[in-house]
Amino acid sequence: MKLKSLSVSLPFGLGSLSFAANEVEQRAAWSLYVELITRVAAQPFMIEHGSLRGLLSSLHSLFALTREILRDAGPDVAHGPGSFGAIAIRVLTQGVAPFTTQWHTALSEHEASRPPEITPREHEQRWERYGEMLREFVALQLEIRAYLAVLATIADIGELDR
């Protein structure tokens, strides 16, 4: 298979990149695209049904999921700093991790103060930082949507939810 030359703008201020994706990178990008597009991280947060803890759990699951996809794909996705593997790792460590690290601790501290007569979701919604976390999540989602566009480009597909 002939390698297709790509130019992509990376999310989270990671710059832009020109590289040629191999078939293994295309398949791995497709796998990650399918997993990511169907998760809370890429979908609108439903205030009436969603929870901040669920949101953080969904984001946290991206780490194990990405590791699994990269491990299954093998070294063909890790041939240098411009490879799919390197991009996926940088998006997690430099893009998603700062958000999850900051908000996991803050939310855990708030959860520990919940009185037994109040539901966890109701307690979350009463938190003085609830709106702040949601605003930051919306900003994070914009970057995740940009990452989905990068994955679609690498996988050589059109974005499926547009």
Image (tube, rainbow, N blue to C red):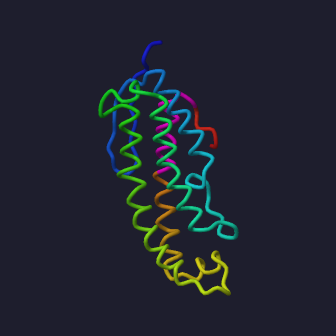
- In the rendered image, residue 40, in percent from the top left (x then y), is placed at 60, 55
- In the image, what residue occupies the spot 41% across and 33% down? 84
- In the rendered image, residue 66, in percent from the top left (x then y), is placed at 48, 42
Residue sitting nearer the eye, 150 or 74: 74
Vertical arrangement, residue 13 with respect to residue 86, above or below: below
Reply yes or no: does residue 152 show up in magenta: yes
Q: Quadrant of residue 111?
A: bottom right
- In the image, what residue occupies the spot 51% across and 55% down? 59
Q: Quadrant of residue 19?
A: top left
Q: Main secondary structure of the magenta part?
A: helix
Q: How many marks?
A: 0
- In the rendered image, residue 118, in percent from the top left (x then y), is placed at 66, 84
- In the rendered image, residue 124, in percent from the top left (x then y), is placed at 58, 77
Vertical arrangement, residue 22 with respect to residue 29, above or below: above
- In the image, what residue occupies the spot 34% across and 39% down? 16
Q: Which quadrant is the C terminus positioned in? A: top right
- In the image, what residue occupies the spot 38% across and 26% down? 75
Vertical arrangement, residue 67 with respect to residue 117, above or below: above
Q: Which residues are magenta?
A: 144-157
Determine the residue located farthest toward the left in the rendered image: 81
**In the displayed structure image, the side of residue 71 where residue 15 appears, left or right:** left
Determine the residue located farthest toward the top in the rendered image: 1
Reply yes or no: does residue 10 show up in magenta: no
Q: Quadrant of residue 96?
A: bottom left
**In the displayed structure image, the side of residue 79 where residue 22 appears, left or right:** right
